[in-house]
Amino acid sequence: MRLEGKRAIVTGGASGFGAGIVRKFAAEGATVMVADLNGDLAAQVAAEVGGVAQVVDVSSAASVTAMAEAVSSQWGGVDIIVNNAGVTHLPKPMETVTDEEFDRVFNVNCKSVYLMARTFNPMMIAAGKGAVLNVASTAGLSPRPNLNWYNASKGWMITATKTMAVELAPKGIRVNALCPVAGETPLLASFMGEDTPEMRAKFLSTIPIGRFSTPEDMGNAACFLCSDEAGMVTGVAMEVDGGRCI
């Protein structure tokens, strides 16, 4: 029960890595808000763990503000924020990515972190404590061709994590990031271009441990970084990648 009594928001919490984090947090005693654009799926996961579902578009200031109002009225504050929601563009030469694809990647992957910080930092600063976890990617550390703007968005998130950590540390708030390799999530096919046995074998050959990251892997790492056990850990971009970035 390492998170007993903690109130946590997990964006993109209805599937993939986010759902793994939600389940682990709940198992460790946290009360979790499953925040997702897919309201039906968020409600299912929230019911499973005894949590709260919240429909949110993390790229929209109005939607994030509405979520903050729900948090204030239901909980009175928040202890943990996991910025997990993310999207990618399909693998293609960088100059062929459209304006719409570029804007969607940066609005969901980057602007959302800004909006969450702007909206929820005051609650944590007032409490004098808190933990923020940004889900970045190995793509931000060891970029692959044809995912240029997705790679850049995750590199942005890693830098944002470090500067947030420096600024918020004196206020009692820790900020860290996780860098998973691709996993069994709804984005896997998008990362590979196509989900075939041949593409999977090619991708897995780049991971020394020989498998994808799982939601359970992410939940375990997230639990540590957001728990009091990691009280001296801030500004870290932890690789959960089976050796991919070595």
Image (cartoon, rainbow, N blue to C red):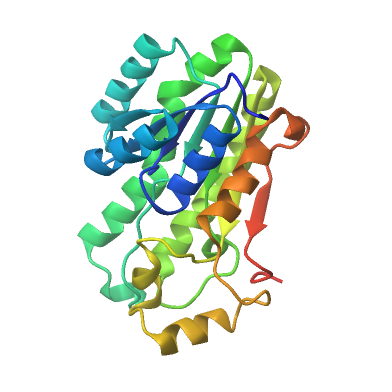
Residue positioned 32% across, 17% down in the render: 70
Visible in this render: residue 24? yes
In the depicted structure, whether residue 167 falls above or below residue 18: above
Q: Quadrant of residue 1?
A: top right
Residue positioned 36% across, 40% down in the render: 45
Q: Is residue 37 left or right of residue 162?
A: left
Residue positioned 52% across, 52% down in the render: 136
Q: Quadrant of residue 39?
A: top left
Query: Picture coordinates of residue 43 (x, y %)?
Result: 29, 35
Residue positioned 69% across, 70% down in the render: 243
Q: Is residue 140 left or right of residue 98?
A: right
Which residue ends up furthest to the right in the rendered image? 232
Query: Picture coordinates of residue 36 (x, y %)?
Result: 31, 40
Which residue ends up furthest to the bottom in the rendered image? 198
Question: Camera-side residue: 188 or 109?
Answer: 188
In the depicted structure, whether residue 186 falls above or below residue 46: below
Q: Quadrant of residue 232?
A: top right
Query: Picture coordinates of residue 233 (x, y %)?
Result: 74, 37
In the depicted structure, whether residue 104 falls above or below residue 43: below
Visible in this render: residue 38? no
Question: Camera-side residue: 29 or 105?
Answer: 29
Query: Picture coordinates of residue 76 (x, y %)?
Result: 44, 9
> Number of numbered discs present?
0
Q: Is residue 214 left or right of residue 114?
A: right
